[in-house]
Every structure is written in C-alpha cells, then in structure tokens.
Image: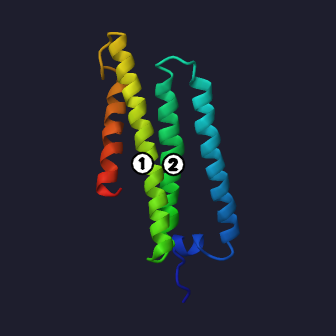
Amino acid sequence: SMRATTLKQWLTSPQLSPMMGHLVTMLHAAVVVVSLSLAFLLFDNSLFSWHPVFMSIGFLLFMSEGVIAGIMFRHIEPGPERLRAIHGHLLLQLRAVLCIAGGFIVIYRNKMLMSKPHFTSTHGKMGLATLTLSLLAPIGGA
C-alpha cells in the first residue's frame, strides 16, 4: 500500500522546491511593500504618527520576517549553518520588539502630553495585551 505523504514531505519535495522558493520570495516582497507603504502613508511628522509607523514596521516587517526565518531554519541540521539561521531569526525578532516598544512609548507619551487616559479603548487594551505577549514570547523561545 502507498504511504500517505505528510505536508512536510510534500513542501520539501524536489518538484515543489523551486515553486516554494518563488512563493517565499513573493511573501517577503509583499511583507516589505505592505509594511513600508503603511508607514509612509500614515506618517505626517506628528508624535502620534510614529505609533503606526513603528507598529507597522515592527509587526508587519520584522516580526513577519522573523517568523518566516524561524520556519525556514527548522529543516537545517544542527551545526554552524543552523546557528547562523537562528541568530538571524533572533535579530529580526529583536528588531520587531524594539520597534513595537518604540511604538508603545510614542503613543504613551502622546497620551500624556494630551492629558488623555491610557488603555480605555478596546484598541488600547488589545494593544497592551499584544505588547505584553510580544515581550514575553522571546523569553519562552516562542
């Protein structure tokens, strides 16, 4: 009887490899275009506008690229090449956390300057929860 093909076997098959390479390249390009377009479109040189800029670049660019890098190194055998790939993943995720923290600091400071309360809207509460999880995830290696 024929053994069922797992998703991993199918995705890493020689017939699919060139197509997967093209799809991954297109995904990288889409992530860069969307995140930088949002950052450019939302920036008006105000303190507030730095919030969506940092968040877009942090979450959409660096975190997405870090997740992709994390997925891509899983098939590499232990050794120097795998360590380099893990280090690249770590640097992308670190950049993401720094941008996200920058976006949080900017919006927190903006609210202080405007004498507005913090974390009262659904967006603010969800943002605080997301920030907390984004800071905790690297601690656990997630």
Q: Is residue 110 left or right of residue 37?
A: left
Residue 32, relative to residue 26: is it above or below? Answer: above
For the point 45% across and 44% down, the residue is 96
| View extreme (bottom): residue | 1
For the point 53% across and 70% down, the residue is 7
Name the secondary structure under disc 2.
Answer: helix
Q: How many residues crowd around disc 2 within 10 Å: few (fewer than 14), some, or many (20 or more)?
A: many
Where residue 112 appears, as percent x and y from the top left, is 32, 15
Q: Is residue 138 left or right of residue 41?
A: left
Q: Nearer the viewer, residue 3 or 45?
A: 45
Labels 1 & 2 near each other (Cβ < 8 A): no
Marks 1/2: CA distance?
A: 12 Å
Q: Which residue is mark 2?
A: 64
Name the secondary structure under disc 1.
Answer: helix
| View extreme (top): residue | 115
Residue type for callout 1: Leu
Q: Nearer the viewer, residue 132 or 17?
A: 132
Q: Earlier in the sequence, mark 1 or mark 2?
A: 2
Q: Quadrant of the N terminus?
A: bottom right
For the point 45% across and 61% down, the residue is 87
Q: Quadrant of the C terminus?
A: bottom left
Where residue 109 appears, as percent x and y from the top left, is 36, 20
Q: Which residue is mark 1?
A: 94
Q: How many residues crowd around disc 1 within 10 Å: few (fewer than 14), some, or many (20 or more)?
A: some
Residue type for callout 2: Ser
